[in-house]
Image: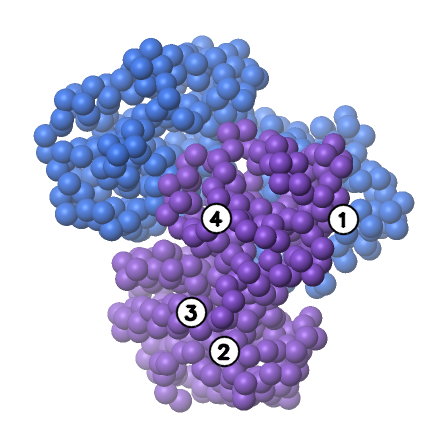
Chain colours: A blue, B purple
Amino acid sequence: MESPIHCFQAALKRRKVDAFLVTQPENRRYLSGFTATDMNISESSGSLLILSGDPPFLLTDFRYQQQALADTKGFEICIYKKGLLDLLKTELPRLGIKRLAFEGHYLLFQTARKLQELADMLAIELIPITGLIEKQRTCKDPGELALIRRAVRLNEEVFIEVFKSLRPGMTERQVAIRIETLMRERGASGPSFETIVAAGPNGALPHAVPGDRPLVEGEPIVIDMGLVLDGYCSDMTRTVVLGRIAQKTRKLFRLVRKAQLAGIKAIRPGRTGLEVDMAARRIITEAGYGEAFGHGLGHGVGLAVHEAPSLSFRNRKQLKPGMVVTVEPGIYLPGWGGIRLENMVVVTPEGCELLNSDTTFLDI
Amino acid sequence: MESPIHCFQAALKRRKVDAFLVTQPENRRYLSGFTATDMNISESSGSLLILSGDPPFLLTDFRYQQQALADTKGFEICIYKKGLLDLLKTELPRLGIKRLAFEGHYLLFQTARKLQELADMLAIELIPITGLIEKQRTCKDPGELALIRRAVRLNEEVFIEVFKSLRPGMTERQVAIRIETLMRERGASGPSFETIVAAGPNGALPHAVPGDRPLVEGEPIVIDMGLVLDGYCSDMTRTVVLGRIAQKTRKLFRLVRKAQLAGIKAIRPGRTGLEVDMAARRIITEAGYGEAFGHGLGHGVGLAVHEAPSLSFRNRKQLKPGMVVTVEPGIYLPGWGGIRLENMVVVTPEGCELLNSDTTFLDI
């Protein structure tokens, strides 16, 4: 199998681009293996300069030099002292770059403006390109799938352990801290997003922040959790109840579960994200809860926890084998709470395969 | 005292700007009190549209509606369904905006381009402005200082507790997990950056990632930790040794401490960041370790853990009362390890006040 970097270099040749400046952190890791993370877009740990031929370059500062050398293979590491643009000023002419592409979706306006000034000075044509590496990243190779499976498995392990320890009176925050601590103790670099533990009415907020609300018997508790293991993400939601399950909860739970299974059944190569979303949404809409399911059905997962493709009305492109997506319908009723169920699947030539192995659903 | 938002509105009037689009997350919180955080620059939880008169607007999507209402006072909350730009298309003309400013340092190239197209269509003049709110944020008011003091105090509490539990054989990762768990258990929303625990030779990397290296008696261990409490950050570094302290460690430790005290002594209104950096750096350089201190002396801390002003050769502007900065000289020797000591101070009319209260330094 061709390596990501060679596949990408071939794409550059086809587009007659001399070099591509990679600033997006997951794209950087995907192409280079460089494991450093960025604190935010203004505090980058490095960029790649990929030419259509070898060697590719990793541009970083002295703080990351050792890590860059240890993580990458075949890359030439260039250290800048006065920032990326200052280094590019000498490197671009030296390498004979005439057409330079950059990631328009991951470069700040201000940086792009300075880069444009530099390009003008050096008579270089600057080309914004969006989503090219992201598109390559959507289809996972076997090595990536193995890492995603491990991340999913660890996530389930942590969930099961924490689930067993849930007791009325524990606060949402305590549960979330327990989950994130356990993730890290078991080898994850951290959660892939801020863990959601939303008890009772808080479950009506799809992005609830865990607070001081205690778990109460009989109330649905939405737990949405994911972790990063060796760079790859998992994402899973369970809705659980301590004690007796009320009739309404049971009914809504079954409805969401039915929608989830319909969504999973609809996934196969050739289907669009919109079609899969509709297959699950129809179940909820026909039961009269269409308005209460206010988000898309799912999203891709890989080096980023939210990546292409999405399963929503916004995505009219066809699914392909190797894509990994979540399937996470939900029903949110202000004042009452919410039910969300989320599993991950990988698209196969014939349909899809469930990546979650557990059966940690309410037994109802 | 004038509120941040009114002070900012006055600045807009002076610049004859009709409205300012605030996308930077800490600036958004500073002006509005909206506590939502962004997963990354591509997944925003909302933006502000500040006019020179009231009311200011908070633009967000349905997921954050409840939180927006709960967190803000005097703001009009506008919910977008198809994204920010789609909402602006109707709101900008409705509000009679002719000159719109945006944050050139926190808007993606691609978004800025679409915003420009929209502005052209609506005959609106678009003005990139950089660092205006950040500049206002550098001088903390008494309420902010109180929050920073709390964050510093909690950070010390956590450090002391973890420090007492350190034993040879514990891994860097275990210590880091313990620190971050305790932070959250004590009320922090999380660490303000990834905790650094760097044992022995790993201490030579200023940005070391905690790994499986065990703590060993006699080796210096660099612990750099900070937390976020009610939105405000702390940042502190200690270098500790388990067991007997070698002569070399003692010598370098004393040198770094001397440099830190010289830096703190140099801080007062009117001094530039460069001058303060030099005051500390001189000590280390004169002792022959200038090359081993490869970063600036410090940085501002507030809603962001790294913000203006910096104490480094890059900052030739004068310090002012109310600014909060770290003072963190270090010596890094590849193969051996590192020593870094970091405290936070607030600039006062006469000089500066140490925000750290503990004396958790090696007693040497």
Q: Which residue is mark 1?
A: A113
Q: Which residue is mark 4?
A: B75
Q: In the rendered structure, are the residues bearing label 4 and label 1 in contact, judged by CB atoms less than 8 Å apart? A: no
User: At 29% across and 29% down in the image, what residue appears?
Assistant: A333
Mark 3–mark 4 distance (CA, rounded to whole Å): 21 Å
Q: In the rendered structure, are the residues bearing label 2 and label 1 in contact, judged by CB atoms less than 8 Å apart? A: no
Indicate the secondary structure of the residue bearing disc 1: helix
Pointer 1 indicates a residue of which chain?
A
User: At 84% across and 39% down in the image, what residue appears?
Assistant: A125
Mark 4–mark 2 distance (CA, rounded to whole Å): 31 Å
The verdict on a common chain for dots 4 and 2 is yes
Q: Which residue is mark 3?
A: B143
Task: Classify mark 4: residues with Cα within 10 Å, few (<14), some (14-19) or many (20+).
Answer: many
Q: Quadrant of residue A325?
A: top left
- The amino acid at mark 4 is Phe
Pointer 2 indicates a residue of which chain?
B
Q: Position of residue B16 (x, y in %)?
A: 71, 55
The verdict on a common chain for dots 3 and 4 is yes
Q: Nearer the viewer, mark 2 or mark 3?
A: 3
> Considering only vertical position in the picture, is A252 above or below B209?
above
